[in-house]
Image (cartoon, rainbow, N blue to C red):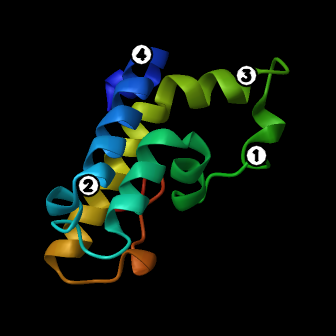
Amino acid sequence: MARLTDPQGQEAARRWFDQIDNVKSRARRWPDGTLAAVRGLCTDRAIVWDRLGIHEADGSELRITPRAADRLRDELWAEAARALADACLAAEAREMPVSDVKVPKTGEGH
């Protein structure tokens, strides 16, 4: 996930997903909708924050500088994506629909 924070890593991920799409035997290994969902998590940062329930309004009163929230999101994106992926994998192991996955907010849970 950390490689996805730089443009070269993002491009490598896009190529990897495209290669899977182009080889039917690889694409069939992914359950319906799963490949598209994982592609979204790896290529669209907004999806990660949305699934974690962290939106632009969250913490706006804590900003010291105009771009503080954006810089913090950039810095923490790989960890957030990893937490979301872990929650999805755990849900899959329990055969829970991914739409029902709840990721604990900071300080909750463990």
Give the secondary structure at mark 2: helix
For the point 76% across and 46% down, the residue is 56
Give the secondary structure at mark 3: helix
| Between discs 4 and 2, the one toward the N terminus | 4
| Between discs 3 and 2, the one toward the N terminus | 3
For the point 77% across and 33% down, the residue is 62
Q: Residues within 10 Å of mark 3 (few under 14, many from 20)?
A: few
Q: Which residue is mark 1?
A: 56
Q: Which residue is mark 2?
A: 86
Closest to the observer: 30 or 80? 30
Q: Are marks 3 and 2 in contact (CB under 8 Å)?
A: no
Closest to the observer: 63 or 38? 38
Please state which amino acid type lies under the numbered disc 4: Gln
Give the secondary structure at mark 4: helix
For the point 85% across and 21% down, the residue is 66
The image's mark for residue 68 is 3
In the rendered structure, the answer to whether residue 56 lies left or right of residue 103 reads right
In the rendered structure, the answer to whether residue 8 lies left or right of residue 32 reads right
Q: Quadrant of residue 14?
A: top left
- In percent of width and height, residue 46 lies at 61, 46
Location of the N terminus (image quadrant): top left
